[in-house]
Image: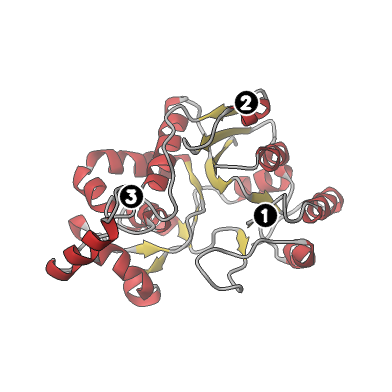
Amino acid sequence: MKIAHLILAHSQPDLLKRLVERLTHPDADIYIHLDAKTPLQPFEAIKKLSNVYFIDYRVKVYWGSFNIVQATINGFQQIIRSGRQYGYVNLLSGQDYPLKSATEIHQYLSDNPGKAFMNALVAETHWMEALPRVELYHFNNIRFPGRFVLQGLVNKLMPKRKLPDGLILVGRSQWFTVTGDHIRYITEYWEQHPALQRFVKMTWAPDEFIFQTILYNSKYKADMVDEDLRYIDWSAGGASPKTLTMEDAEKLISSGKFYARKFDQMKDNTVMDRLDKAQNSAPSGGEV
């Protein structure tokens, strides 16, 4: 079974190269969307690696903005256009790192076909803090001075917004592992529903809900597993997860997860050395 890894990256070419090398497998292709604000030149060495493809249509990515969705869609479209049949498509950031070997990852997914490993909390009952993301207008994807003042005025005057077509809002984490069939359905649904595209452009952090929402409201709902296979530490509070260091190494190794985020090679490089050592000495097998 072939896997396509789609990586959204914007910095740290050495860390990205290291991630790509750890994901390398005879049945793996790696697609990279590099933020259009980032020059390509420092990443040239990665482009020369086997089975690595850079996404042709790059967009400028801003935190919490619609363009993260667009970057992901661009990646899905290029994967589909490749004509290759992928059993799974795995979405990662350039600051992620595997906790298991490529062989273990492929074996686990081969043993668990047809699943959508993604967080899928229903907003109205289990993720209520997400409701304002869609009920209010958000202008964070529009780059002009005073946009947030205008945003506040609009939200005072306009009624609450609702997702088109009666879609039930679900989600939580941006990162997931789903099948090639799921990706094709998501992409086709997105392309065929321009009203949804217009709506999502004025939401906040839609990358954390739009893909789950499309699948949840489809025949593929039964495939969804509320498990994203990732170790992410939110204990520090705030809008971003903790940057993982050597002090987290043993928790990462014993977590049973397949990937972790986020890492910063400038802050701590030794933690990844420890993870590599653990992977090289671990028996085969996987868990979640």
Q: Position of residue 196 (x, y in %)?
A: 23, 49
Q: Which residue is mark 1?
A: 263
Q: Residue at x 35, y 75 (%)?
A: 128
The type of residue carrying mark 3 is Asn
Q: Is residue 122 left or right of residue 38?
A: left
x%, y% of residue 53? 56, 27
Q: Amino acid at mark 1?
A: Phe
What residue appears at the point 34 percent right and 59 percent down from the top-left corner? Answer: 204
Location of residue 32 by image quarter? top right
Viewer-closest of 171 and 220: 171
> Disc 2 marks which amino acid?
Lys
At numbered mark 1, what does the secondary structure look like: helix, strand or loop? Answer: loop
In percent of width and height, residue 80 lies at 43, 31
Residues 213 and 236: in front is 236
Query: Dot 2: within a 10 Å radius of its alpha carbon, few (fewer than 14), some, or many (20 or more) residues?
Result: some
Disc 2 + disc 1, Cβ < 8 Å: no
